[in-house]
Amino acid sequence: MSATPHAQRRGSRRNRIVAVAAGLATVGALAAAMPASAGEAKPGKTKPSRYQDVQLLSFNDLHGNLEPPAGSSGRVTELHEDGTTTTINAGGVEYLATHLRDARGDNPYSITAAAGDMVGASPLLSGLFHDEPTIEALNHLDLDVTSVGNHEFDEGAKELARLQKGGCHPTAGCYVKGKKFKGADFPYLAANVIENKTKKPLLKPYWVWKKNGVKIGFIGVTLEDTPGVVSAEGVKGLTFKDEVKTINKYAKELERQGVKSVVALIHEGGAPASTSYNYDCDSPGAGDGISGPIVDIAKNITPKVDALVTGHTHAAYACTIKDPSGKPRMVTSAASFGRLYTDTTLTYDRKTGDISRTAVKSANHVVTRDVAKAADMTDLINRWNTLAAPIGNRPIGYISADIPSTGTESPMGDLIADAQLAAGKKLDPETDLALMNPGGVRAPLTYAAKGSEGDGVVTYAEGFTVQPFSNTVNLQNFTGAQLVQILKEQVSGSNAASPKILLPSTGFTYTLDMTKTGADRIVVDSIKLNGAALDPAATYRVATNSFLAGGGDGITTLGLGTNDLVGGDDLAALEAYLLANSSAGNPIAPPAANRITIIS
């Protein structure tokens, strides 16, 4: 998948199909000895010792991945001292549960927290059931608290409230006869998400953990730009406030309540200089090894906040970034899909009520698959798989090799674009091209069989994992000049720092010069359709998904098309394309991913 995830609305597909169905570690820097060893109490003493180590276990961007994710989405890279790397298979809640439980042991001073996107863009096992299986799994994991992420709004505020409070789905109903969905045992925090009608936070802004006089507050926010990466319907009636101002406001409020130790759960992140999970991003100097939005956020959040648990970019890091007073502060992220968890030690000073920053240490650990599976998670997965199997096991196509979802131009994204072009031509034979957003390509297709279907067989469940959003395939007319502008908006404006390169259908080609900046990265003279130069004055019929058709991903010109025509479900388009162009004896090959020429 792309480095930065994006969101679209989903939901209608699941309503329809359900109706049919009925320790590896690296220290992230700072560690200094305390005046007295941290512990609950010294031997022979009735009072606890002054310094108490509190364990903070954290993860982010699970995205409903209950089963081990496939392909590169289920691996992490480990960096060795000699500079070589190896890959490790990782993830799956059966293993995550075991690792977290082993890490906790019988420690009474252990908290488990998350930084958003626990649900949304989920594989079929969870997505088919509106992510109730994932909430159930998180309850079993003893998650204490999480911030919301952008994907928690895929189905809107009312559905998020149902996940928190419980109750059966308004249209799909209860999935188990006579059993009502209980909701989350843990609080979702949404300090910067304001209901326009009430002018108040949609959910709790903060939560305080207490144990034997130790008090640690958690403030949860999602990225301010959530409306830019979620469909308009998903964020209707909501305003998303600035992350820094919101956290600073509630840090002051917590201090007034006597809570001086604070952790921020932020669904926004950064990009370390290495993709290895154990890269020491402090080695070049504090903060030098990481870039992206979280850097400016961290530099401006009040020193009252002692640590930042982050997410959204699906990267792995345990870095220090200086706060406004110049003091180093820990900032962590545990990649995505349950492949890692972070273990942070917060040393609480009972005398001051604050965290001693000089003793904060943090490390990411791999959720390896060489440990015993947690039996309760295996039972959970089996129960929901029994309900999902009649739908998920149905073959929808055949492939000759893995179709990756990574890279500036991914073969999986090109395949989806080709499928949407074919769907568009069925709607209107005059359709010229299709464009697919990278964040909507959630996984690869792998040649090796995941179950009993056989190698090379693509099942509906696998297709759902790739495209879980229930977008529609829409047609719009654009001038050639507008198409040029669309390509420029991929790499300029809000996308200048982190380009959102659209995946083109076959026949649409151009050159992307990444040695330039902003809109100049698009080599206008290179843009061609079926070998012919683009005519600025001509009209072109373009297929996109409904997320892009609304101007999603900051590509606002995509929302200005004319002669709109709304087609069918985007996964149905992929299924139809695979069935028409592959068979067991003649599987489809991965696209060459040569439609965009990249100069770097």
Image (cartoon, rainbow, N blue to C red):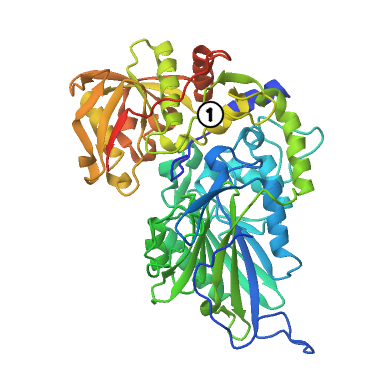
Residue at 65%, 37% (x, y): give it: 126
> Would you name the residue on which mark 1 appears?
470
Residue at 49%, 17% (x, y): give it: 577
Total marks in image:
1
Question: Could you say which is closer to the camera, residue 52 or residue 552?
Answer: 52
Residue at 36%, 34% (x, y): give it: 551
> Is the residue 352 above or below the residue 313 in the image?
below
Residue 292 quadrant: bottom left
- On the question of residue 163 being in view, the answer is yes
Q: Position of residue 302 (x, y in %)?
A: 44, 71
52 left or right of 525 in image? right
> Is the residue 306 above or below the residue 470 in the image?
below
Residue 128 quadrant: top right
Placement of the C terminus among the 4 image quadrants: top left
Q: Position of residue 523 (x, y in %)?
A: 20, 34
Q: Position of residue 84 (x, y in %)?
A: 47, 54
Q: What secondary structure is found at the residue carrying circle 1?
A: loop
Structural crowding at the residue carrying mark 1, measured as other residues with C-alpha within 10 Å and reported as few (<14), some (14–19) or many (≥20): many
Question: Could you say which is closer to the camera, residue 463 or residue 246?
Answer: 463
> Is the residue 591 above or below the residue 189 in the image?
above
Q: Tell me the amino acid under the disc marked 1.
A: Ser
- On the question of residue 185 being in view, the answer is no
Question: Could you say which is closer to the camera, residue 249 or residue 370?
Answer: 370
Q: Position of residue 410 (x, y in %)?
A: 41, 33
